Each structure stands twice: as structure tokens, then as C-alpha cells.
């Protein structure tokens, strides 16, 4: 799974050009990759003749629900949110249903339920595949001796899917390998997480891999390891690389990342809404995964990136979606 994707994978066109003039409210996700994905929705909406508004979200436990209420206040034609567990948004979903506003969620493991039209994108099957790829790679390259510390954010349950899948793939391929999972909070990114990584490694000097369920968690980690005299002590990798992780692969200071096509996910969100507004079958989109690959030191220079350094996967995605949507 080292080769570049050859397309967006989705190949079922819409029945007709979707209606224009729609307004989409996007409940933001407070991570760098979340912002990239939401910009993808904004750009895709523009291509469809729609407009989109991003509603900022803080890092507190109640902030997602508050932002969702603000999204509903503007009476959009649809709301998109990501990562926040459905259980924390029951009141907002009930309100959306009462207002007859369709809601699309991505990056959650929850099934479709009242108020939601789909939860299929970047859900458990997709993220489990990311974990399987990364876990199998670590098992193979460590020659059966990996001792892994995996850092994740349980507040985003879909990241727990990655952690569990990685662990299963690692242990099944490498019974002698060891793994410890270390939970972080959203507000720990770039603040407490770097020290948490240092402390974890110091407690167990046998740890030789640090895996992150989202690249944003590595903010400040290289500097913290360097300050603690631990630079080069562990191999670093995970899912959803930031531009800094991509540069670290080029520099040879990190090992492997599973490519997360955040921009294409944003366009896939818009595609699902277009199918919904058309009355088209959602199943072709629901069952199609995102393009991905393992990005390593050997393959990073060939990987498709956007202008800011984020992984794209397939650079011809705009034209591919426009063909599916029958727009110019």
C-alpha cells in the first residue's frame, strides 16, 4: 500500500446536476486536519453553486454542542459535523430533525440514527484500515521486536478505532511486540502532550516506537524529545500527518504515516449532500473508502500533497468530482 492512489475511488455519478443556492453550516473541528477538511467542504460547495459557513468550536466538552446550536440558528439547508460523539449532541440532532434540517457526520463510529443522513465517511471501516496498515508496517519493519507507545484522544472515539486496529494488527503479526496506549485531551495538543511523550518513554526505556492516532498530537514533541536528550530514541509515525510530519519524513527523523486525504473527505461530504438533495441513492458513496497509502521515508517525495504540505492522495480530485456532479 505504498503506491499513490490513482483516483478518488468513488465512480458513481449523480443522476443530474444538483440544485444550486444551498447553504451548508459546518461545525468546525479544533485540529489542523479538521480545518483542512472543512476548507474542502467550502471549496466543494462553491463548485456546486452553494455557500458554506464554518462555525468555530473550542476545546471544551460542551463546545461542540454549543457550536451545533449556532449552526442551527442560521437555518442552513444542511449541517456537517465531525468527530464529536452523537451521544453528546442528542438535543441538537432532535432540534435539527424538528427543523427539517439534514445533518451529515463524518469521522465518527456511530451508526446512522434519527436526524442523520449518513455517518459513513471516515468511519470505523476507514479508520480501521489506517490502523491495520500502520500496525502491519511497524510489525514488519521492527522484525518482531517493537515496543510501542500509542498516543490518542479518546474524546474522539474514531481515533480509538485506529488505536484498537493498530494494536490488533501489531500483535497478530508480532506476538512478541508490546504496546501501551496513552490517552490525551484535545487541549493537550502542543501543550501537555509533548511532556507526556517524554514521561512515557522515561518510565519505560524499552519503548522504541511512538505512534500517534492523529498527526496534530506531535506538535511540540520533537522539541521536547530533543530537550530531554531522547532525540532518535523512538521511531515516530501514525495516522493523518501534518505538513511537519511530512517534512520530518523527508528529513529522515520520522518513519511512517498513513495518508489522510482531508481535502477529499471535505469534497466527499459535499458529494453526499448533493446526492441527498438530488434524491439519489447514497449507498455508492457510503460504501466507498477514501484514497490512502503508507507514506514512508522512501515514498514521501512521490506522495501527492497540497500547496501547504497536507496529503491529498489524488491531485486530480476537483475534476473527478465535477465529472460526477455534471458541473462545468
Image (cartoon, helix red, strand yellow):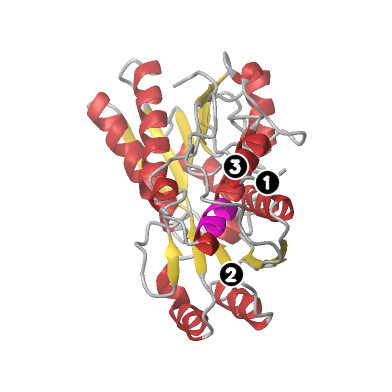
**Helix, strand, or loop for circle 1?**
loop
Residue projecting furthest to the front: 16
Indicate the quadrant where residue 51 lies.
bottom right
Marks 2/1: CA distance?
21 Å
- Asked if residue 206 shows in the view, the reply is no
SS of the residue under disc 3: helix
Residue assigned mark 2:
78
The quarter of the picture where the N terminus appears is top left
- The image's mark for residue 327 is 1
Which residue: 53% across, 42% down?
Answer: 197
Residue 216 shown left or right of residue 287 in the figure: right
**Disc 1 or disc 3, which is closer to the eye?**
1
Q: Is residue 152 left or right of residue 301?
A: left
The local crowd at label 3, few if under 14, some if 14 to 19, many if 20 or more residues have their Cα within 10 Å, is: many
- Residue appearing at x 33%, y 44% in the figure: 164
- Nearer to us of marks 2 and 1 is 1
Above or below residue 249? Residue 51 is below
Magenta-colored stretch includes residue 308 = no
**Majority SS type along the magenta span:** helix
Could one spot residue 81 in this view of the protein? yes
**In front here: 136 or 315?**
315
Q: Give me the C-alpha separation between circle 3 and circle 2.
A: 19 Å
Of label 3 and label 2, which has the lower sequence position? Answer: 2
Q: Establish if 155 lies above or below 160.
A: below
Residue 277: x and y in percent read 54, 63
Return the residue nearer the eye: 246 or 80. Answer: 80
Kindly identify which numbered label has been placed on residue 264: 3
Find the magenta span and give its range: 269-275
Q: Earlier in the sequence, mark 2 or mark 1?
A: 2
The local crowd at label 1, few if under 14, some if 14 to 19, many if 20 or more residues have their Cα within 10 Å, is some
Residue 283 coordinates in the image, percent (x, y): 38, 51
Amino acid at each position: 500500500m505504498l503506491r499513490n492512489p490513482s483516483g478518488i475511488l468513488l465512480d458513481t455519478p449523480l443522476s443530474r446536476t444538483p440544485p444550486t443556492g444551498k447553504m451548508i453550516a459546518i461545525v468546525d473541528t479544533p485540529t489542523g486536519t479538521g480545518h483542512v477538511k472543512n476548507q474542502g467542504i467550502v471549496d466543494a460547495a462553491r463548485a456546486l453553486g452553494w455557500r458554506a459557513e464554518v462555525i468555530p468550536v473550542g476545546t471544551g466538552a460542551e463546545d461542540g454542542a454549543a457550536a451545533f446550536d449556532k449552526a442551527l440558528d442560521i437555518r442552513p439547508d444542511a449541517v456537517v459535523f465531525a468527530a464529536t460523539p452523537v451521544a453528546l449532541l442528542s438535543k441538537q440532532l432532535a432540534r435539527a430533525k424538528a427543523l427539517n434540517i439534514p445533518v451529515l457526520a463524518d469521522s465518527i463510529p456511530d451508526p446512522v440514527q434519527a436526524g442523520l443522513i449518513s455517518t459513513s465517511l471516515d468511519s470505523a471501516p476507514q479508520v480501521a484500515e489506517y490502523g491495520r496498515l500502520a500496525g502491519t508496517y511497524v510489525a514488519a519493519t521492527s522484525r518482531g521486536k517493537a515496543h510501542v507507545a500509542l498516543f490518542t484522544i479518546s474524546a474522539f472515539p474514531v481515533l480509538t478505532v485506529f488505536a484498537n486496529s493498530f494494536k490488533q494488527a501489531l500483535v497478530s503479526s508480532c506476538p512478541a511486540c508490546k504496546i501501551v496506549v496513552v490517552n490525551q485531551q484535545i487541549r493537550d495538543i502542543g501543550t501537555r502532550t509533548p511532556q507526556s511523550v517524554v514521561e512515557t518513554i522515561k518510565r519505560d526505556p524499552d519503548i522504541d516506537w511512538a505512534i500517534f492516532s492523529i498527526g496534530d498530537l506531535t506538535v511540540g514533541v520533537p522539541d521536547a524529545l530533543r530537550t530531554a536528550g531522547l532525540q532518535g530514541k523512538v521511531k515516530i509515525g501514525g495516522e493523518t500527518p501534518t505538513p511537519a510530519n511530512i517534512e520530518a519524513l523527508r528529513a529522515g527523523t520520522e518513519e511512517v504515516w498513513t495518508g489522510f486525504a482531508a481535502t477529499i473527505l471535505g469534497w466527499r461530504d459535499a458529494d453526499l449532500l448533493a446526492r441527498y438533495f438530488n434524491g439519489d441513492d447514497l449507498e455508492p458513496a457510503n460504501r466507498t473508502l477514501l484514497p490512502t497509502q503508507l507514506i514512508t521515508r522512501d515514498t514521501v517525495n512521490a506522495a501527492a500533497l497540497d500547496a501547504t504540505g497536507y496529503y491529498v492522495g489524488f491531485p486530480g480530485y476537483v475534476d473527478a468530482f465535477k465529472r460526477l456532479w455534471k458541473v462545468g
